[in-house]
Image: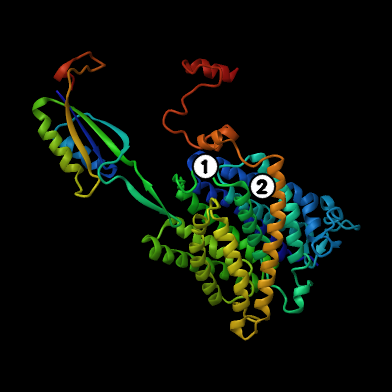
């Protein structure tokens, strides 16, 4: 029977999660140089466009359809276009328990959007927008929807899979599906696509740190839908997830800033914003299964480890431009594995033995391998066909102007021309032309 | 006539405007500038990666003055701009052959 309280909370959660992707666009956009900010933000908005369409066509069916194919993905044609998921034969809205299925579709599509958009942080300032859009649709189809099916849709990595005989795998809101998945994809793409021109030599410093902090704040706000919404109820678990989400993010700010202060001598605003995201990532799989004190431990560890991990790209020479690997892959692994220690009923620290820890490591490794292989194949095919990189000239002069024919800001003197072909000498005549 | 030019720290502009007004200066030109002196910019840290910023934001203040007022006005400018820390800037004076007030066509000191 329909529960309006649950339904209203899930619609609210879906709306919160939807806000995360524009928030991510600000977070990422602020970290790029001013000549590339629009392209960076457009990769998030473009992913929203592509995923919003493919999800209702075949994404839902592949993730949560009843016809599982080997436990890896479900038949994309069973509920193609949401066929059979909205109204039943009697004209009533189809329910899953006490929630209309169509509300769950709305909730889940927002997860697919943000996950795909997350990857774009590894590709800042250098890739063709068309290739990115095609990648978004193909990657969601071959990597995200199957992973969602395997973990949440009754597939290989969930409670009905082979690992469940050891202990039931825990991924409350997307440690494997969202963050490990996106983080591994980012690493693979950074290696296949290659470095930005001047990476490691020229300064690529963030052009707008207030954008970054605003974006981090919006992500934090939206994350309540992500985690508390994943309780699928307006209840105590949702409340626990909400508190754990906030606690872990807060603790991760501190963890990140302590590392910065000790290592670099300064606690920075970019560090605080990054710490928020690292903590949110790490608590995502664990939000419903740890105590708030456990969330503090998890947050501090994630903040500190992610702060250390972001410098790996300079050591190993891959241009994960905005640290998707350092924050989402490392944060996702920290959260997924620490559940084995911190889960309040089955964790090692709570007398639960090592079974949960073993299972968490196994699903993390499986997610890494699956995502790496699938992303590598997609990336290489696109490299050979459409190509990933814009021209060197476009990259040097700024991808915004070259690809989108726009620039984000009017800098000194650049905004003075008239309309193309119309001399701007006489402003009255320009106005007349426009009116005409 | 002389042109007194000061390249100063942006945050000292209000103090400089007040000090110049107090010694009788009635007009000035202020523009944004960037550059570096002996300190060669500064270092910023983003997620642990250090970036050297060579060109530091500055403000350029230009005042046209009568010969006899040069030391008073440049002295006031220097005093108001001074913080005692590296990067306070420079003040210099150059001779000016002629000045024309565009509105009236007046020339020389009467145009100041």
Q: Nearer the viewer, mark 1 or mark 2?
A: 1
Mark 2 sits on what residue? A47
Q: Secondary structure at mark 2?
A: helix
Characterize the local packing of mark 1: few (<14), some (14-19) or many (20 or more) Cα atoms within 10 angstroms: few
In percent of the image, x 46 and y 59: which residue is there? A271
Looking at the image, the residue that sits furthest to the front is A316
Mark 1 sits on what residue? A197
Image quadrant assignment for residue B112: top left
Q: Which mark is residue A105?
A: none
Near-viewer residue (A64 or A394): A394
Q: Quarter of the image containing the C terminus of chain A?
A: top right
Residue A25 spot, x, y in % from top left? 57, 48
Looking at the image, the residue that sits furthest to the bottom is A351
Q: Secondary structure at mark 1?
A: loop
For the question of whether residue A242 can be seen, the reply is no
Q: Is residue A295 above or below residue A38?
A: below
The chain to which mark 1 is attached is A
Near-viewer residue (A225 or A317): A317
Question: Badges 1 and 2: C-beta atoms under 8 Å apart?
Answer: no
């Amino acid at each position: 029977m329909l529960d309006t309280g649950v339904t209203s909370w899930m619609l609210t959660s879906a709306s919160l999660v939807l806000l995360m992707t524009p928030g991510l666009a600000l977070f990422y956009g602020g970290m790029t140089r001013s000549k590339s900010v629009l392209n960076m933000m457009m990769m998030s908005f473009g992913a929203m466009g592509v995923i919003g369409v493919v999800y209702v066509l075949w994404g839902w069916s592949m993730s949560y359809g009843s016809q599982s194919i080997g436990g890896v993905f479900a038949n994309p044609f069973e509920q193609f276009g949401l066929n059979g998921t909205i109204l039943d034969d009697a004209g009533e809205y189809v329910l899953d328990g006490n929630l209309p299925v169509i509300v769950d579709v709305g909730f889940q599509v927002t997860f697919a959007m943000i996950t795909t958009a997350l990857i774009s942080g590894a590709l800042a300032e250098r890739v063709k927008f068309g290739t990115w859009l095609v990648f978004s649709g193909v990657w969601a189809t071959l990597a995200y929807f199957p992973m969602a099916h395997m973990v949440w849709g009754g597939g290989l990595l969930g409670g009905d899979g082979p690992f469940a005989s050891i202990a039931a795998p825990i991924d409350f809101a997307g440690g494997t599906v969202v963050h490990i998945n996106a983080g591994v994809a980012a690493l693979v793409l950074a290696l296949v696509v290659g470095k930005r021109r001047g990476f490691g030599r020229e300064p690529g410093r963030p052009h707008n740190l207030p954008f970054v902090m605003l974006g981090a704040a919006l992500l934090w706000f939206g994350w309540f839908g992500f985690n508390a919404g994943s309780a699928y109820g307006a209840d105590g678990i949702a409340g626990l997830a909400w508190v754990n989400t906030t606690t872990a993010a807060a603790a991760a700010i501190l963890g990140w800033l302590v590392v910065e202060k000790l290592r670099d001598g300064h606690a920075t605003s970019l560090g605080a914003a990054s710490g928020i995201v690292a903590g949110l990532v790490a608590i995502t799989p664990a939000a419903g299964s740890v105590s708030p004190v456990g969330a503090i431990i998890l947050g501090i560890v994630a903040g500190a480890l992610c702060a250390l991990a972001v410098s790996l790209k300079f050591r190993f020479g891959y241009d994960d431009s905005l640290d998707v690997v350092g924050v989402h892959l490392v944060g996702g692994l920290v959260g997924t594995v620490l559940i084995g220690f911190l889960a309040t009923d089955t964790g090692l620290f709570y007398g639960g033995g090592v079974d949960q820890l073993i299972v968490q490591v196994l699903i993390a490794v499986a997610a890494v391998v699956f995502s790496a292989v699938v992303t590598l194949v997609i990336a290489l095919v696109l490299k050979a066909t459409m190509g990933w990189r814009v021209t060197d000239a476009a990259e040097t002069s700024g991808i915004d102007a070259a690809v989108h024919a726009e620039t984000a800001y009017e800098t000194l003197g650049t905004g003075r021309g008239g309309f193309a072909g119309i001399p701007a000498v006489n402003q009255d005549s320009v106005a007349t032309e426009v009116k005409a | 006539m002389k042109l007194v030019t000061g390249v100063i720290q942006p945050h000292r502009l209000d103090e400089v405007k007040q000090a110049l007004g107090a010694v009788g200066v009635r007009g000035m030109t202020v523009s944004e500038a960037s550059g570096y002196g002996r300190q060669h910019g500064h270092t910023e840290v983003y997620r642990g990666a250090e970036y050297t910023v060579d060109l530091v934001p500055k403000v350029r203040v230009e005042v046209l003055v009568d010969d006899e007022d040069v030391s008073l006005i440049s002295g006031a400018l220097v005093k108001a701009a001074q913080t005692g820390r590296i990067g306070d800037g420079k003040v210099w004076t150059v001779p000016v052959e002629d000045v024309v007030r565009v509105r009236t066509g007046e020339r020389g000191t009467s145009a100041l």
